[in-house]
Amino acid sequence: MDQMGLTRGGFERYGKTTKRAAFLAEMNRVVPWAQLCALIEPHYPKAGRGRHPVGLERMLRIHFLQHWFNLSDPAVEEALYESNSMREFVGIDLGHERVPDETTVCKFRHLLERHDLGRQIFEQVGAQHAPWAQDFTQHRGRAY
């Protein structure tokens, strides 16, 4: 019988990098996470008397997953429990912490909407990649 702890702990013999994992690795590299967090941080709840808020970058990464994979709040929670590559992208270790629940995800989305941060995030990411996008548009008809 296979031991679950060993198979999930990196001892797989026949692993393969999936398209999803490759995509998430690329997005991890190209998205300006620090800049986007700085944009949201003034509006994000601070630790106080109640529960500590989930880390800002973690919530932002979950928000991006929702858009990239067309996931609702409950669906992204479920996907994070099921997908190792998504958990790694977000930075969740189920041995030490839970996945943020759908209500937490919903509250984060509402915070972004309330402060018009979704548009600002889109503009910052677009500005960051404008030279690449322009170059791609100019060369897309050419064979390489």
Image: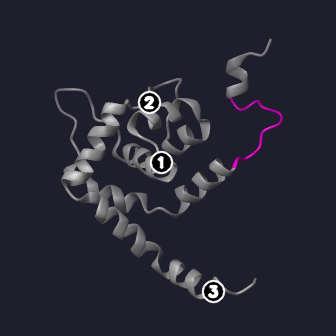
Along the horizontal axis of the image, is 2 left or right of 28? right
What's the distance in space between the residues labelled 2 and 3, CA to CA?
42 Å
Mark 2 Cα shell of 10 Å, populated few (<14), some (14-19), many (≥20): some
User: Residue 64 in the image: x percent, y percent?
Assistant: 44, 51
Q: Nearer the viewer, residue 97 or 115?
A: 115
Q: Nearer the viewer, residue 33 or 74?
A: 74
What's the distance in space between the residues labelled 1 and 3, CA to CA?
29 Å
Q: Residue at x 34, y 45 (%)?
A: 56
Q: Secondary structure at mark 1?
A: loop
User: Residue 32 in the image: x percent, y percent?
Assistant: 43, 63
Q: Residue at x 44, y 26 (%)?
A: 98
Identify residue for label 3: 139
Query: Which numbered disc, 2 or 3, marks the residue closer to the eye?
Result: 3
Along the horizontal axis of the image, is 144 left or right of 137? right
The numbered mark, 1 or 3, whose residue comes first in the sequence reads 1
Instruction: Examine the residues drawn in magenta and state their main secondary structure.
Output: loop
Q: Is residue 51 above or below residue 137?
A: above
Identify residue for label 1: 70
Q: Residue at x 21, y 42 (%)?
A: 45
What's the distance in space between the residues labelled 2 and 1, CA to CA?
18 Å
Q: Which quadrant is the N terminus positioned in?
A: top right
Q: Which quadrant is the C terminus positioned in?
A: bottom right
Highlighted magenta segment, given as a residue range: 9-18
- Amino acid of disc 1: Asn
User: Residue 89 in the image: x percent, y percent?
Assistant: 53, 45
Q: Residue at x 41, y 40 (%)?
A: 72
Q: Is residue 134 above or below residue 37?
A: below
The numbered mark, 2 or 1, whose residue comes first in the sequence reads 1
- Amino acid of disc 2: Val
